[in-house]
């Protein structure tokens, strides 16, 4: 058996793509996935390229793996590999650069890598297998019925993007929008639920484009198709919790909001890319909404679902963002019912229109503005947390608090870890609040729990077990 470790960067889409590659390899019976911290024969690094920092982080990881495991084969795929394959190939120890449309061939490609003789000139056997994204016309169906995460499963229903945001290169690295057939989505989710996954996260590069290719002349077709798919998903027996991944503001319809309000298993949580609180900057970004539309959407959501957790992406220091325009963003965001923010500095992406824009903002200003919005995010999240003190919530456990021992299959602590008097695990509510749950017998296999919120600490809420909903 050839051991394979996976290193995934970026969004939930990349997490799902890693699972497709793992499934394809393990289905052969000749490969087995191992944790990243374990020695492996092959390392598959699934990269992101949304910012220059994402590229740098991937390069650092590649160099570290090369240093720690000099005899291992390193495979690099993902958006960074698709964008600049020859640049990736120049890094030390790279055996294969695999393009986004080429990942379904990962078994045969790795077989060729492993069959190549070891020589003093490894680059003589190095391969770049990167096809143009224009060749990706359909959604590849891979029979994923289990995932490396034990409690939550990501299900990708759409890939690619038909948009033209001036800062973005996703259409260049993932191609045009393409969607899965509803029956295949429902069948996969049913199997994942049957295999014990208690939360399903629906993901797509642009969820609002789901089903659009079936009716390209009607921009509303995707919204309708997504709503009807969600309706059918919520009717799947034994599904405990369903969550939407990042979704554009124009894709959130009144029907979806009302459905979330009516169905307890539909997690009360939206993550919506705003990108700027200034209409002038949104126009330069070529976004298809304005701030007033975003504000109305959030009012509609919170009117129907008062405790809905709502997060937003914000790009800091986009070209042309003056101090006045940034302050406008801060003022608009301060008044919005957001429970957290994801701010990050603008990073020029090669090949994007914004790369050539004038009025570039200095690195110092971008970092300063990001810090300001991170502080605003902490304040908003703290206020949202305070609202839940004393309440009872459902928490899906997924990890052990730092310093807490993992338990073996018999429930006893691992002999190499230490016990604390009050074990604690952490998990998330449906409206995306982190909760540490303390008490005897609590561990990461405890499933969905009913928890009473008793306090608030630096890392989030603290609660005590009321009862196990599903274990």
Image (tube, helix red, strand yellow):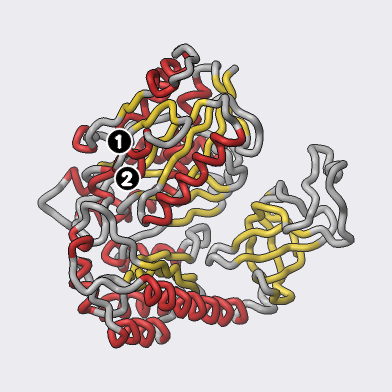
- Which residue ends up furthest to the front in the rendered image? 120
State whether residue 216 is above or below residue 265: above
Secondary structure type for disc 1: loop
Counting residues from the start of the chain, the first of labels 2 and 1 encountered is: 1
Quick check: marks 2 and 1 in contact, CB under 8 Å?
yes
Relative depth, front residue between 295 and 393: 295
Q: Position of residue 101 (x, y in %)?
A: 30, 33
Residue that appears at 53% across and 66% down: 431
Cα separation, mark 2 vs mark 1, equals: 8 Å
Residue 240 coordinates in the image, percent (x, y): 56, 52
Picture quarter containing residue 41? top right
Q: Is residue 187 something one can see in this rendering?
A: no
Label 2: few (<14), some or many (≥20) within 10 Å? Answer: many
Q: Which residue is mark 2?
A: 158
Q: Is residue 144 above or below residue 445?
A: above
Residue under numbered circle 1: 139
Q: Is residue 431 left or right of residue 163?
A: right
Label count reads 2
């Amino acid at each position: 058996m050839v051991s394979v470790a996976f290193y995934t960067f970026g969004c939930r889409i990349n997490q799902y793509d890693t699972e497709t590659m793992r499934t394809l390899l393990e289905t052969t019976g000749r490969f087995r996935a191992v944790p990243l911290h374990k020695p492996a024969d092959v390392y598959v690094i699934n990269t992101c390229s949304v910012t220059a920092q994402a590229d740098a982080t991937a390069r650092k990881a590649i160099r570290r793996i090369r240093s720690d495991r000099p005899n291992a084969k390193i495979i690099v795929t993902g958006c960074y590999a698709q964008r600049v394959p020859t640049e990736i190939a120049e890094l030390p120890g790279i055996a294969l650069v695999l393009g986004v449309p080429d990942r379904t061939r990962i078994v045969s490609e790795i077989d060729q890598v492993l069959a190549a003789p070891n020589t003093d000139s490894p680059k003589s056997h190095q391969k770049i297998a990167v096809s143009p994204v224009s060749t990706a016309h359909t959604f590849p169906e891979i029979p994923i019925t289990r995932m490396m995460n034990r409690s939550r499963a990501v299900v990708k229903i759409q890939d690619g993007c038909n948009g033209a945001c001036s800062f973005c290169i996703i259409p260049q690295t993932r191609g045009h929008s393409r969607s899965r057939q509803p029956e295949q989505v429902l069948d996969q989710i049913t199997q994942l639920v049957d295999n014990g996954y208690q939360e399903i996260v629906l993901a797509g590069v642009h969820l609002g484009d789901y089903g659009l290719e079936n009716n390209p002349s009607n921009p509303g077709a995707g919204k309708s198709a997504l709503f009807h798919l969600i309706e059918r998903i919520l009717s799947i027996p034994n599904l405990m919790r369903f969550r939407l991944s990042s979704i554009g503001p124009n894709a959130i319809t009144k029907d979806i909001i009302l459905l979330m309000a009516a169905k307890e298993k539909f997690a009360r949580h939206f993550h919506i890319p705003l990108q700027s609180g200034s209409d002038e900057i949104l126009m330069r970004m070529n976004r298809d909404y304005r701030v007033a539309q975003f504000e109305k959407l959030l009012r509609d959501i919170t009117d129907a679902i008062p405790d809905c957790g709502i997060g937003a992406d914000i790009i800091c220091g986009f070209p042309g963002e003056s101090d006045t325009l940034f302050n406008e963003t801060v003022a608009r965001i301060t008044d919005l019912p957001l429970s957290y923010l994801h701010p990050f500095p603008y990073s020029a992406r090669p090949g994007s229109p914004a790369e050539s824009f004038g009025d570039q903002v200095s690195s110092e200003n971008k970092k300063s503005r990001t810090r300001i919005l991170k502080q605003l995010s902490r304040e908003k999240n703290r206020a949202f947390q305070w609202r839940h003190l004393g309440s009872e919530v459902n928490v899906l456990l997924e990890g052990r608090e730092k310093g807490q021992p993992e338990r073996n299959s018999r429930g006893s602590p691992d002999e190499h870890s230490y016990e604390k008097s009050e074990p604690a695990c952490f998990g998330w509510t449906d409206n995306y609040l982190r909760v540490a749950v303390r008490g005897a017998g609590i561990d990461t296999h405890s499933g969905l729990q009913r928890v009473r919120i008793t306090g608030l600490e630096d890392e989030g809420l603290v609660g005590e077990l009321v009862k196990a909903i599903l274990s």
